[in-house]
Image (cartoon, rainbow, N blue to C red):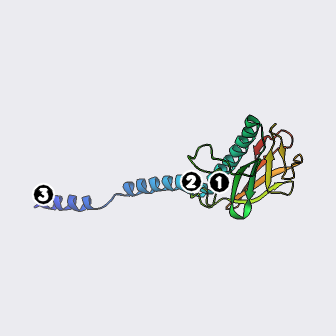
């Protein structure tokens, strides 16, 4: 009879969790939560950094294109549609360097990985167009030397600015 009581007791004990097991599970869940929460909140930060890098790379590419082909190219921003496109000196759309049979046009609204990013302003001497001449010098849409140029992006309260320096056309992200 003693052995029967002992076996019942051990079977009851096997059904529940010990306090140590519960504490270990809570600690593991806490560590996982601490790691996941910053990743969720930084999604907007990653999107805006990606968008700023894309714009900066495209501006540099267009400047290089103007120098290598010895003709003017312009980048026309449209803040209302969160997009921009690249045109040649005859205002014809330019082919995208990596998209087969695609025009050099970027829309953040239609790109799910950048859909939270807004182009709040594109200001190149109060115009939304920057032109790079055959020397890579940035000009405004009136083809006079650029005095200031920047594109401002925003995503969930985070703001970044892509600037084009006068004379040199050097592109920076702030």
Residue in the foreground of this view, choosing between 159 and 127: 127
Residue 148 rendering spot, x and y as whole percentages: 86, 49
Q: Residue at x 30, y 61 (%)?
A: 16
C-alpha distance separating marks 1 and 2: 26 Å
Asked which secondary structure carries label 3, the reply is helix
Instruction: Evaluate whether residue 174 shows in this view.
Output: no
C-alpha distance separating marks 1 and 3: 78 Å
Name the residue that disc number 2 marks: 39
Nearest-to-viewer mark from 1 and 3: 1
Mark 3 touches mark 2? (CB < 8 Å): no
Q: Residue at x 69, y 43 (%)?
A: 57
Q: Is residue 121 above or below residue 100?
A: below
Residue 76 rendering spot, x and y as whole percentages: 75, 54
For the image shown, how many numbered marks are present on the structure?
3
Residue in the foreground of this view, choosing between 103 and 4: 103
Direction from residue 109 to residue 7 in the image, left or right: left
Asked which secondary structure carries label 2, the reply is helix
Residue 43 rendering spot, x and y as whole percentages: 59, 55
Direction from residue 125 to residue 73 in the image, left or right: left
Q: Residue at x 82, y 50 (%)?
A: 149
N-terminal label among 1 and 3? 3
Residue in the foreground of this view, choosing between 54 and 74: 74
Residue 98 rendering spot, x and y as whole percentages: 59, 43
Name the residue that disc number 3 marks: 3
Nearest-to-viewer mark from 3 and 2: 2
Q: Residues within 10 Å of mark 1 (few under 14, many from 20)?
A: some
The tag on residue 106 is 1
Q: Residues within 10 Å of mark 2 (few under 14, many from 20)?
A: few
Query: Based on the displayed image, in which of its 4 quarters is residue 45 positioned?
Result: bottom right
């Amino acid at each position: 009879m003693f052995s029967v009581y002992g076996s019942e007791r051990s079977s009851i004990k096997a059904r529940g969790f010990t306090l140590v097991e519960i504490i270990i599970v809570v600690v593991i869940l806490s560590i996982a939560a601490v790691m996941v929460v910053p990743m969720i909140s930084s999604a907007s930060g990653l999107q805006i950094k990606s968008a700023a890098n894309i714009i900066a790379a495209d501006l540099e590419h267009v400047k290089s294109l103007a120098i290598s082909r010895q003709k003017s190219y312009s980048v026309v921003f449209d803040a209302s549609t969160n997009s921009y496109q690249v045109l040649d000196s005859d205002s014809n759309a330019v082919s995208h360097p990596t998209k087969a049979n695609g025009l050099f046009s970027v829309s953040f609204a239609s790109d799910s990985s950048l859909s939270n990013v807004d182009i709040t302003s594109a200001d190149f001497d109060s115009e939304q167009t920057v032109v790079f001449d055959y020397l890579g010098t940035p000009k405004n849409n009136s083809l006079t030397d650029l005095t200031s140029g920047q594109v401002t992006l925003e995503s969930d309260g985070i703001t970044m600015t892509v600037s084009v320096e006068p004379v040199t056309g050097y592109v920076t992200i702030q």
